[in-house]
Image (cartoon, coloured by chain):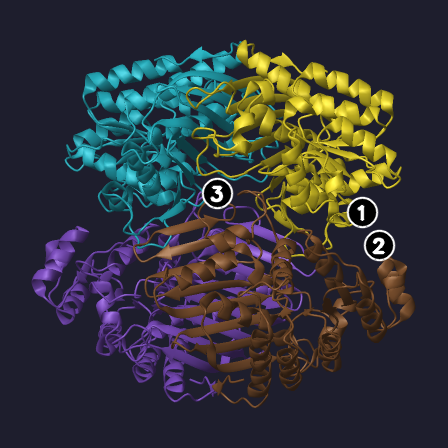
Chain colours: A purple, B brown, C yellow, D cyan
Amino acid sequence: MAMIGGGPGAFIGPVHRIAAELDREIELVAGVFSSDPARSRAGGEAYGLDPARAYGSLAEMLAAETARPDGAQFVAVVTPNHDHLPSARAALAAGLPVISDKPMTATLDEARELAAVVEASALPFALTYTYSGYPLVREARARIAAGALGKVRKVVVEYPQGWLAGPAEGKQAEWRVDPARAGAGGCIGDIGVHAFQLAEFVTGLHVTELLADLGAVVPGRQLDDDCSVLLRFNNGARGVMLASQIEVGELNGLRIRVYGETGGLAWKQEEPNTLTLHHLDGRSEVIRAGTGLLGPDAARRTRTPGGHPEGYLEAFANLYRDFAELVRGGSAPLLPGAAQGLRSMAFIDTAVRASAARAGWTPLSI
Amino acid sequence: MAMIGGGPGAFIGPVHRIAAELDREIELVAGVFSSDPARSRAGGEAYGLDPARAYGSLAEMLAAETARPDGAQFVAVVTPNHDHLPSARAALAAGLPVISDKPMTATLDEARELAAVVEASALPFALTYTYSGYPLVREARARIAAGALGKVRKVVVEYPQGWLAGPAEGKQAEWRVDPARAGAGGCIGDIGVHAFQLAEFVTGLHVTELLADLGAVVPGRQLDDDCSVLLRFNNGARGVMLASQIEVGELNGLRIRVYGETGGLAWKQEEPNTLTLHHLDGRSEVIRAGTGLLGPDAARRTRTPGGHPEGYLEAFANLYRDFAELVRGGSAPLLPGAAQGLRSMAFIDTAVRASAARAGWTPLSI
Amino acid sequence: MAMIGGGPGAFIGPVHRIAAELDREIELVAGVFSSDPARSRAGGEAYGLDPARAYGSLAEMLAAETARPDGAQFVAVVTPNHDHLPSARAALAAGLPVISDKPMTATLDEARELAAVVEASALPFALTYTYSGYPLVREARARIAAGALGKVRKVVVEYPQGWLAGPAEGKQAEWRVDPARAGAGGCIGDIGVHAFQLAEFVTGLHVTELLADLGAVVPGRQLDDDCSVLLRFNNGARGVMLASQIEVGELNGLRIRVYGETGGLAWKQEEPNTLTLHHLDGRSEVIRAGTGLLGPDAARRTRTPGGHPEGYLEAFANLYRDFAELVRGGSAPLLPGAAQGLRSMAFIDTAVRASAARAGWTPLSI
Amino acid sequence: MAMIGGGPGAFIGPVHRIAAELDREIELVAGVFSSDPARSRAGGEAYGLDPARAYGSLAEMLAAETARPDGAQFVAVVTPNHDHLPSARAALAAGLPVISDKPMTATLDEARELAAVVEASALPFALTYTYSGYPLVREARARIAAGALGKVRKVVVEYPQGWLAGPAEGKQAEWRVDPARAGAGGCIGDIGVHAFQLAEFVTGLHVTELLADLGAVVPGRQLDDDCSVLLRFNNGARGVMLASQIEVGELNGLRIRVYGETGGLAWKQEEPNTLTLHHLDGRSEVIRAGTGLLGPDAARRTRTPGGHPEGYLEAFANLYRDFAELVRGGSAPLLPGAAQGLRSMAFIDTAVRASAARAGWTPLSI
């Protein structure tokens, strides 16, 4: 695997590296860790790479790696959003599969372009919607698909954070509040889109219509930092998606609740090894990771026995394990790809436009 | 105290009785427990009253009680919503203060009429917005008023229930889903209004604008059973109010989170003796009832030492304690009265109309 | 009902009053609230009693109340431990049933004497082991009795508090650390005995042998303030009882876990409306008060629907409801009486002596 | 790194591999994964090793690896307890540092022998007391060392599990209940020793005396499966260690509470990213991993921002990171080594002997 981005000071680069290598099916061997060659070399050194394979530009890397017999077999795109399209396009053009940070691109138009490129390439392409890698999220999906809740009627998905309650400082924050690098969505593109994807992933439903209320709460902020979006799903279910980056005290509080005709279900990212199921008769059941209660898909994505907590890195690694399967020519039906990426970009785009126009209910179409 | 309503099979009548008498400042001595005289007598017997004071009609009771030297000194209205206005009006006309179940009336017009009657009477009038009686809700209000969060920016208040996920059966459920008795609002009038009142109570802010999405999820239901309402407050803060009665597994999950420039705060009704405060530096503090950390208002409303849980009945009793103070000629500034009742009715009315019209953002004015 | 003790400054007197009256079957009408007549009158006034019935001595009260046609029908003993025997003996001698604070007396010898007096009187006698009044404690007992866990193998019961971590100040604390008023046990007699009683109550088993390690952690303290006691039950089950009053940050953290051959169960006093059941196949079930999942005994002791929390006062009231039934000539098989009181005193006595002698395993016999 | 043990079907082998490699400072390059050469080769293949480096015996491996210029630089011992001494001794004799599963050996005598060998070798030696690798355990230790609780007075450490409540089946269970492979301790040696080590690690104190009550609850079991041990520490503090493998419903519920003169502290392994601190004034503070509230040692052992949970594998990796530092010649003062191993073996040995003899309080000396 070769990485684009993720150099010194980045949070997400090391996460990709750990996640990719966790199951020993993948090894980071090359990268362009910065557009500045010296910083790129420093990045390679930090990862312990052969210095010759810490490249100064993407073009250079693609040329060199595809020429080596032991060259990287795929590329991980770990840059700010505005760079996702050009990087992925170049890698695919060089014949290399791509796994990319979400959201797919900075704009919906770019996403359409990239989707077309992916399709034309016939190469594996995946997006790291991390939370869909958690075993109990997979279990929730499987249970709903098997009818545990009856027909789904209501979805509440929330993603509270507080880290942007003050001025956006530091490398992680700066680009996220800058429209030139993040795209048109702030909070909605950074975390709202995770919540949206999780809701569709867990329920197996599609959002068909939305009503968005995005705001910039911190004075001077150009992009939204607080979002409330009402939803309708293709089976008629009602939904709510709340995301915020100004809720002081919240760290990474993604959680989802789904209610159907005959049951309910709840999962929280910060305590990810527990899934709660509610039944019409009043019983609530707590399902824990690593026990014999998990279905095959969730069980296969668990590395420790019950009570030995797995977390964010292991969920991320589950996506890489799926991706490795794809690269080997296998199948990974639950791994988010270009179709999910397009839907997510349409979600961001529709929400941003509808909110700006105070447009009320607006169809979500792609 | 004399009660109107609350007879055999009612949940809320015994709750009023227990709450009123808990601190031994009030005694239930009379009532009209049903419009059917035999059932009313049965009600009186169940409460252990003098049979002569279980009346067959309100008019009869008011005449008799005001004629006795030891007659009831106020009336508690515990009937379905459509009866609140006539009962309260008659009691006030007889010179008796009134404490009534929320919402104030079945319609906004009725509420305006009742507010005028209350004002003209110059008698005490209160509404049992129970949740504002919890000690830690009072503490939350006091802390926010004292600036613990800085300027409030965001309010999320939720009220999930699941008991109407199936057909509405039984005395509690039937009238709540019947427009003739409940008024125009279903879930919004039954529990959404509690959430609204709690949000204004805790923050000291007023909602100025709302966007409502009310739905009837259960087939055949005439009134809404699931509500999502976006809010704006008079200081510019953003808000969300979610209430539902079809969320299987939820019992009475009212909770509120408030976020300001420098802190956040969270409280849940089902674990009411804990208040969590978040600070900008990452510290979260847990404040527990019955400890020395509570301010004077909350401390006075606590009857047990820390760790000996109080609950719903004690919160309800705190409202009666305030009301007894009013009846004695004292002051109870935090007890919800006609003004709060009117605001709440305007909230229901505006939400119902705006949702039906898909009207988008709509001013809340009274 | 007439109260002995519970005057100005006492915590437990008002608790008894509220609990006794909560269901309107009992009314506090008289009392000796202090051995000082002026303070006793002040106590009566605080409770809103007829001043003539706030007596200056127990003898005076018993004479006066038994002479009145509307005299108190039973006596509640709410004094420090050393007074339990003389007060109860006098009341029983006057023909009045007695409900008393735990522990039964200050010493085991006194308890034996009182048990004999109770038996000879053939009058109702009960001890307010409050925690056995919680609906979900009753439910736990019923489930275990019905075989939900299979044969019980292990019991862990803990009662952590922190309020005596510093010097014992204030009326509540002072007598509890004074051997002359509390008896030979400090923490073990104040709260350890609750834990012991809860363990026997929930499991239906009897402790047959114990190994006690009691200590006085705070310098200068004469009685134990920290206790660890290992247990054996009559069916061979193993157990642990931990109680402490010096664990800073703990309020009233009584909790019990019971494990059997086929299941486990957990309950916590500070969140009393939830009972967790574990099954051998890995499923955990959460049972909540006020739902249809409770058996008849627990259901009858619940006053609010699910999600409307009840607490300490309501649990206490459930004991008074049982006691009222006894006084009316009915039956209340789960209400702790003299037999349970004797067992508890034997527990305190055995633990104190065995610990002082570092005696190792010691039989618990009565 | 070369591994001894951890072949097909083992839980702990893959855990070591992931943990060792997580930070890319260590690579698994060789191993003896079974005493059966074919199974050893299968193990090597499962790990993706060069087939030539999956050896049939330890002697073969040590000879081959020390002869290669790129040979493994240390050995990880991942076998059942009875094999720890011979494997570690051989590796050290070959000049290779050793990191080993706990407990150190099967018996205290073996531990003494191994400690002497380690000392003579002057090579790095470490034991994977995993739980001391959690960032918030390190934070707890640092806070106590800095005086956050004042003088420590009481320690309660619990380790409930339920997986051996029925017959011990499967590779993980079988050897643990077999004295020939596990040593004299069952539950006490498998998990009690973790609890003991955690208590000493977090408090910085030493246990000086203990009273042990070990039992075999499941019929036919030869080793203890349920343990209660009372403790005294070298500063006079009192303690309790409870561990069990028959508590149905418990997965891996290790938790510790420490109480001092001025504060208290609580941590639970199953929710490892939170540490609660209690203060004398009633405030409780929640400290979360990944926030700015952690001291330098805990912060350095955290790989994700707050709210992105890390777990068991990351805690384990923190020990390997420390060990890598040792192997490079650096220092890792918090990594458990031979001294901690000896203390732990003395704990097991003393507890087993004292319990069998019903000996009461028994000194713990090494």
x and y, in percent, of residue B201 in the image: 50, 67
Task: State the image quarter where residue B64 is shown.
Answer: bottom right
Q: Are marks 3 and 2 in contact (CB under 8 Å)?
A: no
Depicted D169 relative to depicted B291: above or below? above
**In what element is the residue under mark 1?**
loop
Determine the residue positioned at 43% across, 76% down.
B233
Q: Nearer the viewer, mark 1 or mark 3?
A: 1
Question: Mark 3: which amino acid?
Answer: Gly
Q: Nearer the viewer, mark 3 or mark 2?
A: 2
Question: Mark 1: which amino acid?
Answer: Glu
Depicted A17 relative to depicted D3: above or below? below
**Residue designated by label 3:** A307
Number of marks drawn: 3
**Residue designated by label 2:** B48
Cα separation, mark 3 vs mark 2, equals: 54 Å
Determine the residue positioned at 62% across, 58% down.
B321
Determine the residue positioned at 22% across, 37% down.
D324
Question: Mark 2: which amino acid?
Answer: Gly
Q: Are marks 2 and 1 in contact (CB under 8 Å)?
A: yes
The disc label shown at residue C25, or none? 1
**In what element is the residue under mark 3?**
loop
